[in-house]
Amino acid sequence: MKPLISIVTSSFNQGYFIEETINSVLSQSYDRIQYIVVDSCSTDATAEVLERYKSKIDILLVEKDRGSADGLNKGFAMAEGDYLAFINSDDCYKTNAIDVLVEQILCSETDCVYSDVEFIDHNSQVITPYSLPKAYAVKLKPIDLFARSAIIPQQGSLWSRRIWDYGIHFNANNKTCWDFEYFSEALAAGFKFSPVYDCLASFRMHSQSITGESIFNEKTTLSRLHDQRIADHQRVNQMFTDSGLKLSRPEVYYLKTLNLSRRVKRCISSGDSLPALYSLFR
């Protein structure tokens, strides 16, 4: 029997995008999915969308939470799957995403796999030069995350529930990079991660996106999350330091340069455009 996959969407006031997110889960070619949606009492069109799809969502929880990380914890606490994933309420999967991720995680015998993702805009158009090369998944070690020389594209990730059962959950106090902290903690604990060299999901950049605010919002808006972002990253850095990792500035530069060279080679080999190649250096 195929393993059961539990996918969680934590949402709040993303009514313009969440229907596309839901459909991207429901249209998966993989046929053993438990879909859980946790909504923090949205006040926009989200409620109407969820009402239309509630018969197709396995678990729908509508109640106030302390943010996306808290909502994810509530969702995964109800998950029954052998493997876990989450897709934000403004992002979406490619149709074959879960099939590919399941095949890869079973073949690789690792605890987490993660794919390339593309960046899309408000209208679901691929953004150039903020496109595939910037979100390339590369093989990494804890020290790569510590140096911020590589990322784990969350939208295209799937991991064993062993990580959750081990006691690694999302930090509800993290308001800017809860997925980064979650994966960092799992890597630091010794769980094995492997990249999937395929584009399996779309990461939406828009004015209400926590990640996208650096592109779209004014400096006055950016300053709101500045202190929280610093605190979140300091906490992750301390976790790595407590695990025995140390890095000098030259070592950080070396790791970032090494990762950049890998991405340039992949960009060239994939035949991407010059603007896409330029995006690697931004």
Image (cartoon, rainbow, N blue to C red):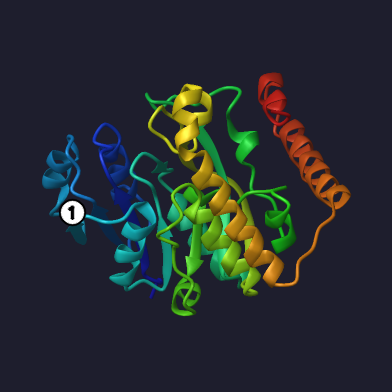
Which residue is at the front of the view, 268 or 187?
187
Quadrant of the snapshot with the N terminus? bottom left
**Which residue: 60% across, 40% down?**
135
**Which residue: 44% across, 79% down?**
165
Which residue is at the front of the view, 46 or 113?
46
Quadrant of the snapshot with the C terminus? top right
Circle 1 packing at 10 Å, graded few (<14), some (14-19), many (20+), is few
**Which residue: 73% across, 55% down?**
144
Where is residue 66 drawn, in percent x and y?
31, 55
Residue type at mark 1? Lys
Q: Which image quadrant is residue 84 in?
A: bottom left
Count the numbered circles shown: 1
Callout 1: helix, strand or loop? loop
Residue marked by disc 1: 56
* Drawn side of residue 260 relative to residue 55, left or right: right
Where is residue 270 drawn, in percent x and y?
70, 34
In this view, 35 is above or below 78: above
Check the image and name the residue furthest to the bottom: 166
